[in-house]
Amino acid sequence: MTEITATTVLPARRQDVSFVTADGLTLVGELARPAVRPAVATLICLHPLPTHGGMMDSHVLRKASFRLPALADLAVFRFNTRGTRSDRGRSEGEFGGGQTERHDVAAAIGYCADLELPRLWLLGWSFGTELALRWGNDPDVEGAILLSPPLRRAEDADLDAWAQAGKPVLALVPEHDDYLQPAQARQRFRRVPQAEVIGVPGAKHLWVGERYVRIVLDEIVRRVNPAAWPLPTEWKDSP
């Protein structure tokens, strides 16, 4: 058995992907699926603010793709929103301040739906939570998981729409978040009766530290595939 650490990459079927938005931009990304078994659900990852370094390789999203296909039978779809660059490449276009990215979210959902990937969940982090709340309430989406939601761009009307849809919403809020802390988050999310807000003691906005990454991934799996929860901390090596 090998301990799972910050640099562990577990087996998966990984493929580079590209897809086109309704306004004609080609976006780049990666799809990671379980190596052997079919996926039971899919995470569509929406990354933090690209003007502050956010991209598809932001560490929590990258670690989700490295671990969750093997540990929880989840497909993990990551991509760069318009104008964002990572090792995978640069998506066409320019940053749209969260407005024109509506086309990126719609295209990502449509791409996964066209592949007939199972049970689509949005996994947003920071800026990505704003995209999820504003533009991700799509008929093909089962629910949303929000990491460090600032609730700066998303408005009460967006929250009301999720409330009306009745879809599950899970918000993981760091105790020491720079923008929205647990007590404030619970107040804001009161508009969404089905929302579950979990404050994470000691955590900060960027979820730095393996301890906090494990908390995040565990909570994702608890919600999306509870049969695989709690996640193991070791991996059985191949013979």
Image (cartoon, rainbow, N blue to C red):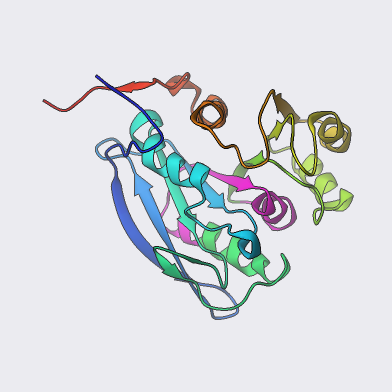
Stretch in magenta? 111-139
Residue extending farthest to the left is: 239
| Residue occupying image coordinates x 68% and y 54% | 127
Quarter of the image holding residue 89?
Answer: bottom left
Front residue (pair 64, 117): 64
Q: Where is residue 177 in the image (x, y as percent from the top left)?
A: 74, 38
Q: In this view, does 196 lie to the left or right of 18?
A: right
Question: In which quadrant of the rendered image does the C terminus lie?
Answer: top left
Residue at x-position 55% and y-position 65% = 107
In the rendered image, the quadrant that contains the N terminus is: top left
In the depicted structure, whether residue 107 falls above or below residue 178: below
Count all numbered tags in the image, as a single digit: 0
Q: In this view, does 220 lie to the left or right of 33?
A: right
Relative to 22, residue 213 above or below: above
In the displayed structure, 4 sits above or below 45; it is: above
Give the x, y percent position of residue 193.
82, 31
Judge whether residue 150 is colored magenta. Answer: no
Residue 120 sits inside the magenta stretch:
yes
Task: Identify the residue at image location x=37%, y=41%.
Answer: 66
Q: Where is residue 153 in the image (x, y as percent from the top left)?
A: 80, 57
